[in-house]
Amino acid sequence: MSITFLHTSHTHIQRFNDIVHKIIPDYVVNHIVNETLLEDAIKAGEVNKAGFAEQIKAITADTTDKIICTCSTYGVLCDDYQHVFRIDGPIAELIVTKYKSVGIAYTAVTTRDSSMNLIADTGKRLNQSILIKEIDCSHCWTYFEQGDIEKYESEIALKIRTDYDGEEVIFLSQASMQGAKRSPLIADLNIVSSAEYGVAYLIETLSDRDAE
């Protein structure tokens, strides 16, 4: 089985290579980066459906790989394709089956509705009730755009610490936010992110499907 990751930032290439190699050291994956997709969504306030469809078509024309979209903003469009999977789907199922309350932290405003709806819809599908709190870290996004990842992650951690109100789990809804987990400010909190869990789950699940 081969996998192509679709990213909206070049910073994700090394991040996801590292995650994959922790699971399978010699596993080789492909990476496609389309930063315009997220830029368009932020400017318009909604996903670029046509642009996403064109990108999926272009990838599919070159390979039969399974495609994993690592951008939570565009996760909502992945269900339209049998061979495209959203990175945050697996962690959403884990959250709603294990916890009764979740704080959803985000930095890109375009991710807010996608992630909130994902958790709510997953809860309905699995017949699980869960309280959802929004943790708006959108003021941190400018640091990511500037390439100041240290400030980006530290400000995310500070906002989570400030807004935390006893939620059983905090969900970092974007792959770019994963490094914030290392902050001592939130070391005592139960923090989960989509990247590591999603990659491990999808590699195992997709491999099992191919073996059938």
Image (spheres, grey):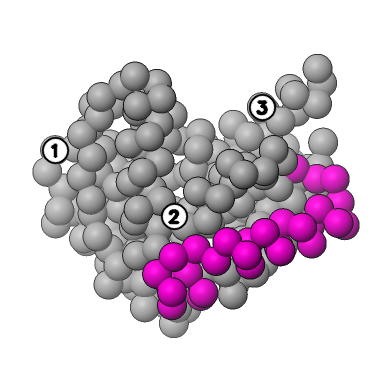
Given the image, on which type of amino acid does mark 1 rest?
Answer: Gly
Q: Which residue is mark 1?
A: 166
- Residue 157 horizontal/vertical position (percent): 27, 58
Give the SS element for disc 3: helix
> Which segment is the magenta one?
39-66
- Disc 3 packing (10 Å; few <14; some 14–19; many ≥20): few
Res 110 → quadrant: bottom left
Whichever of callouts 1 and 2 sits on the residue coming sooner in the sequence is 1
- Residue 126 horizontal/vertical position (percent): 40, 21
Whichever of callouts 1 and 3 sits on the residue coming sooner in the sequence is 1
Q: Is residue 36 left or right of residue 150?
A: right
| Discs 1/3, front | 3
Residue closer to the observer: 162 or 35: 35
1 and 3 marks in contact (CB < 8 Å): no
2 and 3 marks in contact (CB < 8 Å): no
- Disc 2 packing (10 Å; few <14; some 14–19; many ≥20): many
- Residue 170 horizontal/vertical position (percent): 29, 43
Q: Which residue is mark 3?
A: 205
Residue 190 in sight: no
Above/below status of 144 relative to 15? below
Spot the residue most to the front: 50
Residue closer to the observer: 18 or 40: 40
* Dominant SS in magenta: helix
Give the SS element for disc 2: loop
Q: Which residue is mark 2?
A: 174
